[in-house]
Amino acid sequence: MGLRRKRYEDGDGDGDGDAVQVQGTTGPTGDWAVELRGVRRQYGRGASAVHALRGIDLALPRGSFTAVMGPSGSGKSTFLQCAAGLDRPSGGTVRLGGTDITGMSENKLTALRRSRLGFVFQAFNLLPSLTVEQNVVLPMRLAGHRPDRRRAAEVLGQVGLDGLGRRRPGQLSGGQQQRVAIARALVTRPDVVFADEPTGALDTTTAAEVLGLLRQAVDGLGATVVMVTHDPAAAAWSDRVLFLADGSIVDHLERAPADRIAARMASLAAPSFSGAAA
Ligand SMILES: Nc1ncnc2c1ncn2[C@@H]1O[C@H](COP(=O)(O)OP(=O)(O)OP(=O)(O)O)[C@@H](O)[C@H]1O
Ligand SMILES: [Mg+2]
């Protein structure tokens, strides 16, 4: 625990959140699960250009759970898509598991996403005509590997769905369906799991179970999770919350309780923020 905290301290150790870069003192480039340097994303040109990301610098250690929060339009989805190789930044570099994906061809990027990244979405995104087990092994099949049924059973056990592999998603509750999606995200032992509002469609109790599962994937299996959420209670399960405003990371909180996270969010959303962001 002490070690973990130490790794998350901000650059100058004053805890004021100025050093969201978190690139710490140890490890050469490439040691990180996720590394963004000067990442910008601009939509359109000239006077009508939208600067969705204005130079994101961060490095997230393996085996960490990071939440990304911010007001609507602050750039959360753009951040997640650029970090996960689903969108190309206008500038800067993105490294995943030490691999620079910036100039990668679309084919290589697709292959990397399938074998080395996991995704969990608000809407579960399971294929209804496939069984639970078939959904879980889908990333293996898409990556051109033989579906490993033993691995599927193992990961279904890890998410608490032992014995449900033959069901169809429609025969499961929402929380169970999201567990299947998490099993699918973990099946290839990816470098990073990206989650976009994974509890947005779940009630509070079920959401807590799903978040506990992501936490367990980090603590027990060494997974790295990056999760976008609007919900301070969800973010409180993470090791670190990054706050985005107007395309920049403006603050971060370490191991913070939901009320502190909510208070920070409220201050970002307040009209006076534009002054504070400068
Ligand atoms: N395809 C696009 N074309 C033009 N502008 C876009 C496009 N996608 C996003 N934007 C703009 O980029 C900015 C960041 O959008 P983004 O979707 O990343 O925000 P967000 O933080 O995910 O918001 P929300 O919480 O509402 O989902 C916004 O100003 C948005 O209008
Ligand atoms: Mg969004």
Image: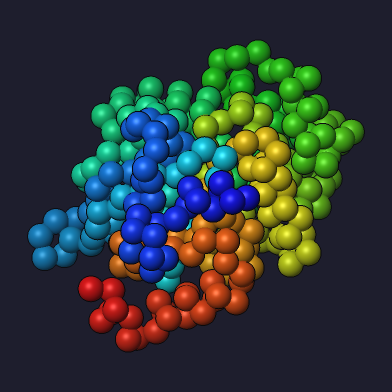
Residue 275 relative to residue 234: left or right:
left
For the question of whether residue 246 can be seen, the reply is yes
Picture layout, residue 40 above or below residue 266:
above
Q: Return the x and y of residue 79 as percentages of the image width and height.
A: 38, 52
For the question of whether residue 89 can be seen, the reply is no
Q: Return the x and y of residue 146 as percentages of the image width and height.
A: 65, 13
Q: Return the x and y of residue 145 as percentages of the image width and height.
A: 60, 14
Picture layout, residue 107 above or below residue 195:
above
Residue 203 relative to residue 165: left or right:
left
Which of these two is toward me, 28 or 92?
28
Residue lying at the far left of the rendered structure: 46
Give the colour scheme of this rendering. Answer: rainbow
Which of these two is toward me, 220 or 16?
16
Residue drawn at (53%, 25%) of the image:
115
Residue drawn at (87%, 35%) of the image:
162
Which of these two is toward me, 219 or 72?
219
Q: Return the x and y of residue 171 as percentages of the image width and height.
A: 84, 45
Residue drawn at (76%, 55%) of the image:
209
Picture layout, residue 275 above or below residue 140:
below
